[in-house]
Image (cartoon, rainbow, N blue to C red):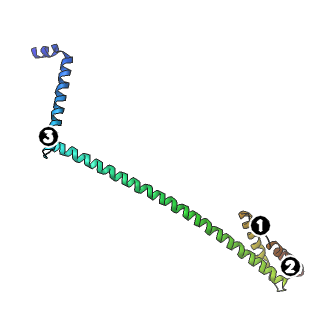
Amino acid sequence: MDAIANVLELDLSSLIFSLFILMSGTISLAAMIGKFSEMIGKPVSWIAKRNEDHEITLQNARAIKELSAKHEEAVRQSIRHDEMIKRELKQLTEMLIKKEINDMRWEIIGVADNISNGINISKECYIHCIHTYEDYEEIIERENISNGEVEISMQIVNDSYREKLKSGF
């Protein structure tokens, strides 16, 4: 009971101050031992472990930085490739549309030319030519392209078709 009474009589601020000085001294002593052991080339195991952990951390940081740079370059290349593919796809699409339009024009003009030259055309050929012209008109409207000589050819086809419907095939 006397021991408890003695502890309660102690000055609390001096006790905390004493503990703080004791901890500071312990930390300073540990730091001096660590520095001394490094100077003589025989580091204490906890110092060696700390240094090893520090080196691993630095290596990881360098590896992350290198991976980040590689990732950024890969993203830049990917964007460049995407743009190139889009450009080439657009060119290819334009080429296909032009080819389709030209093929339709030649087909319609060819039928009109045959009619003008007196070549007999079947009813199915007239119907096909009219449907081709409808598709042609749809494409040139969608692509905002002017019509040109095909209108004259279709006038010849339509006039001949109406005449054939009246007189028979």
Calculate the distance from the C-alpha at mark 3 to the C-alpha at mark 2: 111 Å
Q: Nearer the viewer, residue 42 or 153?
A: 42
Type of amino acid at the residue the image marks with label 2:
Ser
- For the point 75% across and 75% down, the residue is 105
Looking at the image, residue 127 lies above or below residue 61 = below
Type of amino acid at the residue the image marks with label 1:
Ser
Expressed as whole percent of the image width and height from the top left, the position of residue 140 reads 74, 66
Please tell me in which quadrant of the rendered image residue 93 appears. bottom right
Expressed as whole percent of the image width and height from the top left, the position of residue 165 reads 86, 78
> Is residue 92 shown left or right of residue 28?
right
Please tell me in which quadrant of the rendered image residue 20 appears. top left
Label total for image:
3
Dot 1: element: loop
> Is residue 9 shown left or right of residue 144?
left
Task: Give the mark toward the camera: 3 or 1.
Answer: 3
Calculate the distance from the C-alpha at mark 2 to the C-alpha at mark 1: 25 Å
Mark closest to the chain's N terminus, 3 or 1:
3
Disc on res. 146: 1
Q: Nearer the viewer, residue 42 or 101?
A: 42
Expressed as whole percent of the image width and height from the top left, the position of residue 131 reads 76, 72
CA neighbours of label 3 inside 10 A, class few (<14), some (14 to 19), many (20+)? some
